[in-house]
Amino acid sequence: MLKIGITGGIGSGKSTVAKAFEVLGIPVYYADEAAKRIMNEHEGLKEKIKQLFGEAAYTTGKLNRKYIAEIVFNDPGKLAALNAIVHPATLQDAADWMNKQTSPYTLKEAALIFESGSQEQLDYVIGVTAPAPLRIQRTMQRDGIGRDEVIARMDKQLDETIKMKLCDFIIINNEQQLLLPQVIALHEKLVTLAQNK
């Protein structure tokens, strides 16, 4: 079974593309959702997060995401420290999940595949790309935030051009080219690669 990553910058539409693969019967591990779950369930990780951010990091046993987001988006050191404790737990959870799947290949959808080093566990990486103005507009609509906040988040991610050069396959999600034919063609290619592995 092949292990495939799917990544892209904020607002690129990687979750939309991942859901299209799910329709084709491919299981998808959503790293952001998993990280949120793990930060709420993993007792050892919860303790480390409290040590890093104080008791206010959790309210009524649940991660206080707004409180932590306000800190990490303004403090690169705290963001790096948070990633250093969350990424290993998420990488292990993803590996365990992928090993239980029985499809020709599985997908791991994550914004920070290269930044977290998780490409080491993957056979191939799909990049989802879209023009910056479209990504900004999508993120503003999705998250209900202003343009400046979107740009600040984009600045924290690996440059889109560099990220796409690191990927093995590219899906263009610019609302000009049809998405589904690209997904189906890539699905067929990955099934063939999995059979020949």
Image (spheres, rainbow, N blue to C red):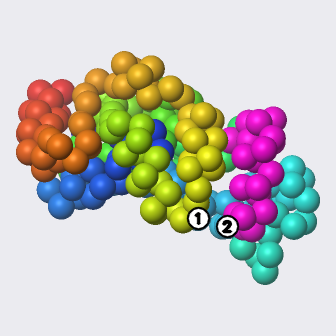
Residue shown at the point (86%, 55%) measured from the top left: 53
Residue at the bottom extreme of this rendering: 60
Within 10 Å of the Cα at label 2, are there few (<14), some (14-19), or many (20+) other Cα atoms? some
**Residue 111 sits above or below residue 169 on the image:** below
| Residue 60 falls left or right of residue 7 | right
Quickly name the residue at label 2.
Answer: 40
Kind of residue sitting beneath label 2: Asn
Locate residue 44: give its quadrant. bottom right
Which contiguous range is marked in magenta?
A: 63-83
**Residue 58 sits above or below residue 97 on the image:** below
| Residue 170 falls left or right of residue 79 | left
Q: Are marks 2 and 1 in contact (CB under 8 Å)?
A: yes
Q: CA distance from mark 2 to mark 1?
A: 5 Å
Q: Secondary structure at mark 2?
A: helix
Query: Residue 105 location, x and y as percent?
Result: 24, 43
Front residue of 30/149: it is 149
Residue shown at the point (58%, 60%) measured from the top left: 145
Magenta portion: prevailing SS class: helix
Query: Residue 110 location, x and y as percent?
Result: 46, 44
Q: Quadrant of the C terminus?
A: top left
Residue shown at the point (59%, 56%) measured from the top left: 146
Front residue of 129/68: it is 129
Q: Tell me if I can see residue 170 in this picture.
A: yes
Residue shown at the point (37%, 25%) measured from the top left: 164
Kind of residue sitting beneath label 1: Arg
Q: Secondary structure at mark 1?
A: helix
Quickly name the residue at label 1.
Answer: 37
Q: Quadrant of the N terminus?
A: top left
Q: How many marks?
A: 2
Within 10 Å of the Cα at label 1, are there few (<14), some (14-19), or many (20+) other Cα atoms? some
